[in-house]
Amino acid sequence: GNSVTQMEGPVTLSEEAFLTINCTYTATGYPSLFWYVQYPGEGLQLLLKATKADDKGSNKGFEATYRKETTSFHLEKGSVQVSDSAVYFCALKGAGTALIFGKGTTLSVSS
Amino acid sequence: EAGVAQSPRYKIIEKRQSVAFWCNPISGHATLYWYQQILGQGPKLLIQFQNNGVVDDSQLPKDRFSAERLKGVDSTLKIQPAKLEDSAVYLCASSLEHRANEQFFGPGTRLTVL
């Protein structure tokens, strides 16, 4: 069945450091891929998405590229801020199937 | 635009008791989802409604969990009787019909079963 594997955290960075959170997936067909973010005390928010191979999703300085050849959708940001501290979830959705989430990666950014 | 509303935000109960959670989706969203998020894991879909009909409840433990969306708007998720392993955050989400790629999540209800 479909599944998502993302790197374990916590990830601890200093402000302005480069961020990568790895995400790989297993799926039949051509799923859509997502990154969701959960800030402390808040609900899940869609950060970015990509619906087909080679698409790049971007938002708030974050980017992720849908790589079908490596079944990956790694999240990157060139310069993180303290306000980016949150839990990040990679997710996929196939046609007619439920949204499936990874376990989440906690990011902590210090000034 | 108001977001997805959920109540209560927190609930503590003893095992074998019953509990109910309420969700009011974004106005005009025909599709409503309930997810269970156990600590340290990603959310897992329990049930999906399209208007007041069930689309997917394959992951719902039907011996103890039930959900309804009688008028196609707000929804209630019930657990009866609760077990220790039901301790989790219960998330409600909604989307426009046929726009499951754009789900909007509520703040969740954190359930602790003692």
Image: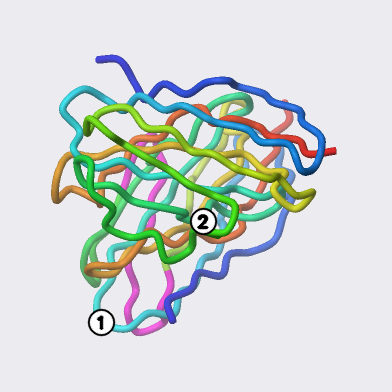
Q: Residue at 47% of width from left, 54% of height from top?
A: B46
Q: Amino acid at mark 2?
A: Lys
Mark 2 surroundings within 10 Å by alpha-carbon count, few (fewer than 14), some (14 through 19), many (20 or more): many
Residue B113, given in percent of the width and then of the height, sits at: 78, 39
What number is the disc on residue A29? 1
What number is the disc on residue B50? none
What number is the disc on residue B44? 2
Element at label 2: strand
Q: Residue at 37% of width from left, 79% of height from top?
A: A27
Residue B74, given in percent of the width and then of the height, sits at: 32, 27
- Residue lying farthest right? B114
**Quarter of the picture holding the N terminus of chain B:** top left
Image color mode: rainbow
Answer left or right for A88 relative to B18. left
Kindly report the secondary structure that dominates the magenta region of the rendered protein. Answer: loop
Marks 2 and 1, how far apart at CA: 21 Å
Instruction: Inspect this view and state whether residue A11 appears.
Output: no
Mark 1 surroundings within 10 Å by alpha-carbon count, few (fewer than 14), some (14 through 19), many (20 or more): few
Whether residue B83 appears in magenta in the rendering, the answer is no
Q: Is residue B31 above or below residue A39?
A: below
Instruction: Inspect this view and state whether residue B70 appears.
Output: yes
Q: Amino acid at mark 1?
A: Gly
Residue A64, given in percent of the width and then of the height, sits at: 38, 57
What is the span of residues highlighted in magenta in the rendered image? A58-72
Q: Nearer the viewer, residue A96 or A66?
A: A96
**Quarter of the picture holding the C terminus of chain B:** top right
